[in-house]
Amino acid sequence: MSSDSWELLSNQAVAACAVVYFLAVLAHLWEWALLRRATPVLAVSAPLVAAGAGGGGGLTVGTSPSPLRGSPSGEPPSDTSSFEDQERADLFGRIGVALTVVAVSVHVVAMVSRGMAAGRVPWGNMYEFTMTATCFVGIGYLAFYKRFKLGWLGPIVTSFILITLMADVLLLFEGVVPLRDALDSPWLVIHVVAAIIATGAFTLGGMASAMYLVKERWPNTRPGGYLSRLPDLAGLDRVAYRTQAFAFPIWTFAALIAGPIWADHAWGRYWNWDPKEVWAFITWVVYAAYLHARVTAGWRGRSAAILALIGLATLWFNFIGINFFFGSGSMHSYA
Amino acid sequence: MSDRTDAPALGPVEFARWIWRQLTSMRTALFLLFLLALAAIPGSVIPQDNVDSILSAQWRTDHKTLTPIYEKLQLFNVYSSVWFSAIYILLLISLVGCVLPRLAVYARGLGAKPPAAPKNLTRLSAHRSWDGDADVVATATSALRRRRFRVEVAADGRSVAAERGYLREAGNLLFHFSVLVVLFGVASSKLFGFEGGVIVVTGNGFSNSLSQYDSFQSGGLFSDSSLKPFSFTVKNFHADYIETGREAGMAHEFDATVNYQTSPGASSKTASISVNHPLTIDGTQIYLISHGYAPLITVRDGQGNVVYSGPTVFLPEGQDFRSFGVVKIPDSRTADGKPLQLGLQGEFYPTYAFTMATGPISLFPRADNPAISMLVYQGDLGLDSGTPQNVYTLNMKGLKPVIGAKNKPLRLDMMRGDTAQLPGGRGSVTFDGVSQFVKLQISQAPDSWVALLGMCLALLGLLGSLFVRPRRIWVRHDPASGLVEIAALDRSSGGDPTPEVDDLAKELGMPDSKSVSAEGGA
């Protein structure tokens, strides 16, 4: 295949995986909508919950129409209908995850064919970096799905990837061009792949931290609602900590070891206080504070979660903001 | 410091102790970490002298009112400023103060025995019990040893205590110690190192002595005698540009070929320098930073004598390589022999084009259709005053434009090979051709490997402190009732010891059905 046809394949795969991500989002929304009705037995006296049929309902018909028609939403929530809803919700949850697997696979195809088109690793500019980073968010989510019981993260992860990927295609798209000299180095692979994995894991951890704060703010939600089905606060905190503790050493390696070595090769200075470096350092310091906060009395839980979100904000600001606000001032302005 | 406390005044010793306790508390460390992150921000917003001196000089001329304030606040040198240094020095003290006592505790604990089993094992979340024999203690001892626990059997032989994961704290201490190593390495490579910049036109040479550098910065403990006596000649420079797409015009491959000698008299070697591939001569590294054009310009005076000739470095102004430069001719003469100082100032266009909308532009960075466009000045160049001058600009104080046709300042627009006559018998200017120059950075950072080593150790320590799971396990047999109890405590913040307890219990012969309590882990 020629470079052009690889590029075409990549572009089509991005579009295709976006469609599948969209279907996955819908499936998850429908799952959670059903779960709102499938309230536990103790909530029989709760008022009729019609929201499930209202919000997500109309949209999902296209995905899988047959099993939905059976239950008229006006029916009183008896045990059996509640049980059926629970089963259906589980079904849609599984459909959502299956669609996510398909979407991530197509996403990988997009990434690989982009690399084939360029004849190098597919993270030479912002478009490619975003595409690859979101792909790693998806891979990370699926990899930890069983181990950390991440089912509750489905709607958040899929919509995050969908939105980021769409923004990437609309705002950052670029055709394949050869690498400029400074990027033509084995360190591109090492430094950037580490940065991408860390970014993916920090993003997942940040989602858990965000849900921690939401759940902490509204602890007494209606049983059956989304929040009540999240893991308890300690569980959310543990998932957030584990993913972020996984990401932190990788980020340390990417930003403070591989980066300086490469910079030393390319620019003759291992640390130059370039805006991108400054913000990578800031991110590192904030996450270091997060790890410290988590073992310090009085900083556990809420404060630590806020620190983690600040860290995530600096991370994404570094990636996107630096290029737009500081532009040519940064030696990293290409990525 | 805080004077507004109502408590009885502290003596100097108590006060010092109070300060020390405050400084080394975790809360202060967190606060300082946060402050460090905040303090780093201005340096990414305001151009820094040591990062891009041209940009910061430009910023200073653009912001007349803010500049003196920023200068006072050291905002052009954030990372070497007093306040930034203060934060990280306080952080270091806090780190040392936090780590030293822990080091002592760790050293004392290194040979310590695992603490004896607590009275009430059922209180621990990971806990199992069943009826068993007394030999369970012996089995547990060897099973725990196999699992690389440190094991201690109680004096009465009824219980065994085990602990593992001592490396977590070791990793933690190693990480904090490595931060000090990194700072030491950075400081040392800065103090003993230097960094210089030089522009060399292809065909010209450079020998490593202070006078040859265009810019030179060195650390406080650097001495000129540590400059290695090498020299080199830039033979050739080659650049490839991206032809199409959004990144068109960007150089994607460029390299310079040099001949070098490690010392005068040594044999000459050939090497190539390109981005990512610096040349190292005798511990000094030579980097190719950027490149540009040096038009060959010849100036003849009114009597036809050559008064200026050669490649003239024009500094690129953007990715299209439109470049700015000057020519200074201090010793020209008019046709009737009167002394005359001339200055040319203007731009070089590698691929010249002209539209009414944009004026003269360069379409592409390659020298496909080179042209220069320069204004001519005469008067006093200011070279005799003895004060050093920027070679890339004219000092306009004593200069007036030469007037050409239609009473407008004379502008010479020349393609390669053109010669322009200057009016009034001032001679002529010829644009002979185009050479290229390379901008090289030459630097020596002697102990940078220390910083790298420190960072790698820090990573190693970090891995230990994050992923080693310190754990205590107790097994107890009560001879009166025959009850066997096993319980575990996870001392890290993310682990769940229940699976290991189950595994061990099975090994010790717990019947499958009789699991007593199994709450989720902490």
Image: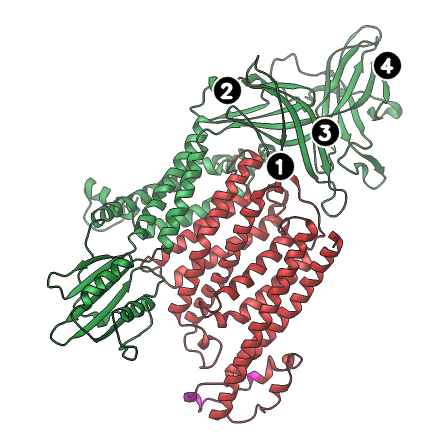
Chain colours: A red, B green
Dot 1 or dot 4: first in sequence order is 1
Residue B187 vs residue B492, the one in the foreground: B492
- Judged left or right of residue A272, residue B398 is right
Amino acid on which the number 2 mark rests in the picture: Leu
Residue B371 lies left or right of residue B204; in this view the side is right
The tag earlier along the polypeptide, 2 or 1, is 1
Residue A330: percent from left, percent from top: 59, 42
| Amino acid bearing label 3 | Phe
Q: Which residue is mark 4?
A: B424
Q: Nearer the viewer, residue A298 or B209?
A: B209
Type of amino acid at the residue the image marks with label 4? Gly
Task: Give the residue type at disc 1.
Answer: Asp
Q: Which residues are magenta?
A: A39-52
Query: Up-down: is B294 above or below B351?
Result: above
For marks 2 and 1, give the CA distance: 38 Å
Could you say which is closer to the camera, residue B58 or residue B304? B304
Q: Position of residue B304 (x, y in %)?
A: 84, 9
Q: Which residue is mark 1?
A: B62
Label 1: element kind: helix
> Dot 4: what SS?
loop
Lower sequence index among marks 2 and 3: 2
Q: Which residue is mark 2?
A: B227
The answer to which image quadrant residue B126 occupies is bottom left
- The answer to whether residue B51 is left or right of residue B127 is right
Residue B139 visible in the current orientation: yes
Q: Which of pointers 2 and 1 indicates the residue nearer the eye?
A: 2
Q: Was residue A46 drawn as part of the magenta stretch in this picture?
A: yes
- Name the mark on residue B324: 3
- Specify few, some or many for label 2: CA neighbours under 10 Å numbering under 14, 14-19, or 20 or more: some
How far apart marks 1 and 4 lie (CA) works out to 39 Å
Q: CA distance from mark 3 to mark 4?
A: 27 Å
